[in-house]
Amino acid sequence: MIEISDKFQMILDYLVCLVDKIGYVGIFVGMFLESTFVPIPSEIIMIPAGVAVSYGQMNLYLVILIGVFGNLMGAIFNYFLAIYFGRSMLFKIGKYFFVKEKTIIKIENFFNKHGAISTFIGRLIPGVRHFISLPAGLAKMNFKLFCFYTSAGSLIWTIVLTLLGYFIGENKDLIRKYLHVTITICILFCIFISIIYILINKKKSDNLRN
């Protein structure tokens, strides 16, 4: 029987070959879909792309740039989807992609609680990053601000995954270990940013009152 670790290595090797064959277009399409309702983890796109970079098959800067651009375009797609179809239609569409109503409501509450900065924070949290653009669209968040925060969050996440694949992509055990550590660090970073954001807003509110 093939060990789980061996299966993981086989999948990784397959994805590296696939990324090499479909190239930058594949990275764009994959990261675009990852930002929409389609449940494609960015890890299975950008980590193999990082491995391909380490083999000299792709350019590091282009991989990151195209990954971020694909993410941004997918987020914009979700943003306008929410604006034009509204919450009730999103619930119906979500069912076809195994996205429950309570998931959308939960992320919408997250957005309402943290405000515009949540589009940045959300890009760094697995399970939230796929859908954070929907409440931004429902709230008709300033489009330029939406693009800025989305790009900033996507840039950090894309760089992390690509470098993870670049430096330790062939070591399956290290990928598991450091991916978990990376996610934990991102969540702690998001908490830190949220605290700073709240303190700044509180200070502004106090100044306006005075």
Image (cartoon, rainbow, N blue to C red):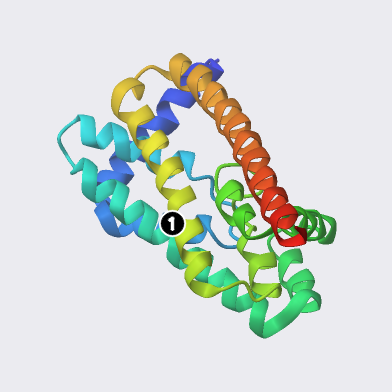
Q: Which residue is found at the position 35% from the left and 20% from the top?
A: 168
Q: Can you say which quadrant of the picture contains the N terminus? A: top right
Q: Which residue is found at the position 62% from the left and 29% from the top?
A: 188
Which of 56 and 142 lies nearest the eye of the viewer? Answer: 142
Rendering coords of residue 96 (x, y %) = 71, 66
Horizontal side, residue 27 vs residue 178: left or right? left
Rendering coords of residue 15 (x, y %) = 37, 39
Disc 1 crowd, CA 10 A, few/some/many (<14, 14-19, 20+): many
Rendering coords of residue 207 (x, y %) = 69, 55
Horizontal side, residue 170 vs residue 38: left or right? left
User: Which residue of the protein is positioned furthest toward the front in this rendering?
Assistant: 210
Q: Which residue is found at the position 62% from the left and 72% from the top?
A: 141
Helix or strand or loop: what does disc 1 sit on? helix
Horizontal side, residue 138 vs residue 77: left or right? right
Which amino acid type is marked by label 1?
A: Ser
Q: Can you say which quadrant of the picture contains the C terminus? A: bottom right
Which of 13 and 144 lies nearest the eye of the viewer? Answer: 144
Give above or below for 146 relative to 42. below
Name the residue beneath numbered marker 1: 151
Rendering coords of residue 24 (x, y %) = 26, 54
- Classify residue 86 by image quadrant: bottom right
